[in-house]
Amino acid sequence: MSDDPKVFVPSQPLKPGPRYGILSGFDPGTRTLPAGFRIAPPFRSVPVEIVLEKDVAVTLRDGVTIYVDVLRPAGAQKVPVIVAWSPYGKGQGTSPSVMGIFNLVGLDNGVVSGLEKFEGPDPAYWCAQGYAICNPDIRGVADSDGDSVIWDRQEGRDCYDLIEWLAVQEWCTGKVAMSGTSYLAVSQWFTAAEQPPHLAAINPWEGVSDVYRDLVLRGGMPDTGFARQLQDNSYWGKGRKEDLLAEAERYPLMADLWEDKIPRFDRITVPAYVVASYSNTLHTAGTFRAWRRMASKEKWLRIHNSQEWPDYYDEANREELRRFFDRYLKGEDNGWEQTPRVRYSVLDLKGGDQVGVGADAFPPKDVTPTKYYLDGRSRALTPTAPTDEATAAYDVVSNPDAVSFITRFDKETVLVGYPKAHLWVEARGSDDMDLFVLVQKLDAYGTPLQQFTVPNQSARVQDITERGASILRYKGSDGRLRVSLRHLDETLSTDAVPAHSFDRIEKLSPGEVVEVEIDLLPIGLAFHPGEQLRFVISGRSLLGTLMPAIREYTPANSGQHVVHTGGKHASYLQLPVQASSQGMAAKEGATQRETTAFAVELVSGPTAAGGVDDFELVFARRALARLKALIGRQGLMDLLARDIEEGNAFLRERAKASAGKFTSGTTVLAVRGLKAAQFVHWLENSFSDENILLAGEPEHFVIAPNPDSTVTIVENLGPYVCRVVLPGFDTAPSWAAEASNELLPESDYPFRRLGAMHLPDGTVVGRVLTQFGDTAEGFNANLTCYFPAACPEDILEQHRQHLAVEFRNWIVAAAGARR
């Protein structure tokens, strides 16, 4: 009887279909592909003559025969070889499935030759650079013998045997490397740990490094959606394939089976160029873990800001990889060692990402783990622990089924490194909890910021990433934990990155409050003054599935989840805060090691107060005012006539669809050094001055007082230019009762005005409620806008921003008039 704990199911032969490519058929022999050869029209042609040795038999140490394709430059000169190890068929590069994936992410199939394995190096490029490529059908796949396994040490031993076979072929220099993304990265951890003598370098480009913690039981939860897709849609062959799904059900705790699926990182000693991202919810944790724990003295880490496939096939990145391989496979003295050991990205999520920021370590040495304490009463994240205890709770089947906590940054703040959550939690009505946590970036107005990681940002990709396909759209750093599996592995855990043993179940008793630590994915995120960070705790996945068409995990939750804060239960979020916020992309030059923080500072010259941005804003306002004055009121009306017609038609249709219902949004400004009565007095006296009103907001095109005391306004409402009439403000119009939810106590906010905006035909398309009340230092301006309920959310959001700019400028003008 076998002691092997693995479970197997029958595989199926690879037949023509979605995963069958032009070269998928078994066809042993050697042929020459002439320069200019193109395997099919969508793909690039090969620039040099290539020898293709197809379906070459290689015998492994246990007698199993596998078949490999070798593509190498023609000629007698010996070359090093790069291995692309995975279960994806060696002829799959031209298959409909791979072409479909390229289309999904927005990659042109013409960037590759179709001779490459899915996620692997392209022979068209590498053969032209003096390298061979080996594409194997691994154990149990296609026509290779044996039973296939998924990501374990057996694969490392098999690839060891292939590497040593390749090294002694007459065309090979004896130098072998490995490269590729995803599965092709994971196999490199296992192979390098076996220490094949002729393995000269590895290039893992994002890959799982612990099957239990990364793939099938992340956080201790049996979330096997991607494992099912991998198992069902790969490993086509004649024998059997490993059944990860059955194994996850049979072995829910850490066991020998899972230990065998963790590489021996301390045995990885070859030079390694590792590539990672913050956004791959399958691979990110595993890539950073492997890079941290591998023993290689010569290891480099680059953290990009996109997705693995576009990044891997990017021309500049491929050239850089060639420099790495030229150094360690060809012995070229090209200065590679001067490359910063770490190059990281800082995401801005508004188009201002920094990439290639050089450092000696990750996190960089100027990063300090900083605790932000949860306050259950205010729902804020605070730098000091609240003295009073409080709770925040949600019912797992209710809406909302989450609690969140927010902090606003008053200065430039950069987070680079490993976040973690340290929580005190209680389960009511259950003895366990599946917890999900997320760190989000919000703009200054509270809107969550996100970023696509792939070139394709079409309607289809918008749809599939709205909830799910998380590797295609970055929404923040997440983590998860089943609370009964909260026991920490003292050997693996650090203060920055907790690691759980997953070897015992500790259920919760009624009323028991327990302490848990949850690791979140590494982060590189910039916050500008006024922007906010939101920390969310929920009983469901906050990001959805990692790819389309994957079954979503259903958490094993019931009852109520309670988060305890303050006092003896001081829950906190630990964030990696960088001391300096300026960074610069590392130079590409081979001799540059140190990087200089980039900044442009005004040293001398202007005597006026302010910085360059302030001067630019003054000039921009002056130029805009000049243009408006030159064009004139009627000129602007004529110039914008078509836009106004379209905008008014849109609002009219939205008002009709809303059947008199409105939705509202509020902006609040806190003012120091000016009282509410002073501002209101200035505003009332200035409302007849067209120039003052126009200066309030750049998208005020026309504000024209009419003889009947109404005001005609041409401005943007969201993205639409509209012409509306404002009859004036009142303290108690007929619709005031509809605004009762937003009305503040008159004793605190005595200056209240309500107004309605309508189209020239009388259709009401908007309302405004302004409320001003004094504070100890000045006053608060509470500004609420109302739009037809059927209007898109962006109209409401953009008008909240509009009100912030408009009233800020008017308040500044009112204060200036008093000096």
Image (tube, grey):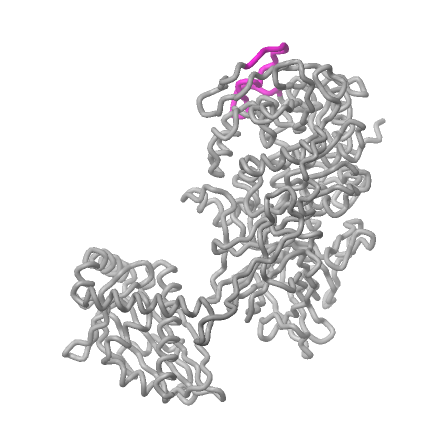
The answer to which image quadrant residue 759 occupies is bottom left
In magenta segment, residue 357? no
- Residue 398 in view in this figure: no
Horizontal side of residue 775 vs 91, given as left or right? left
Horizontal side of residue 423 vs 739, given as left or right? right
Task: Give coordinates of residue 374: x percent, y percent.
Answer: 64, 70
Q: Nearer the viewer, residue 195 or 264?
A: 195
State which region is magenta.
13-33
- Residue 147 in view in this figure: yes
Above or below for 625 versus 737 = above
Q: Nearer the viewer, residue 504 or 501?
A: 501
Quadrant location of the N terminus in the rendered image:
top right
- At horizontal 26% and vertical 73% (from top left) the residue drawn is 756
Quadrant location of the C terminus in the rendered image:
bottom left
Above or below for 520 versus 95 = below
- At horizontal 49% and vertical 18% (from top left) the residue drawn is 36
Horizontal side of residue 500 vs 102, given as left or right? right
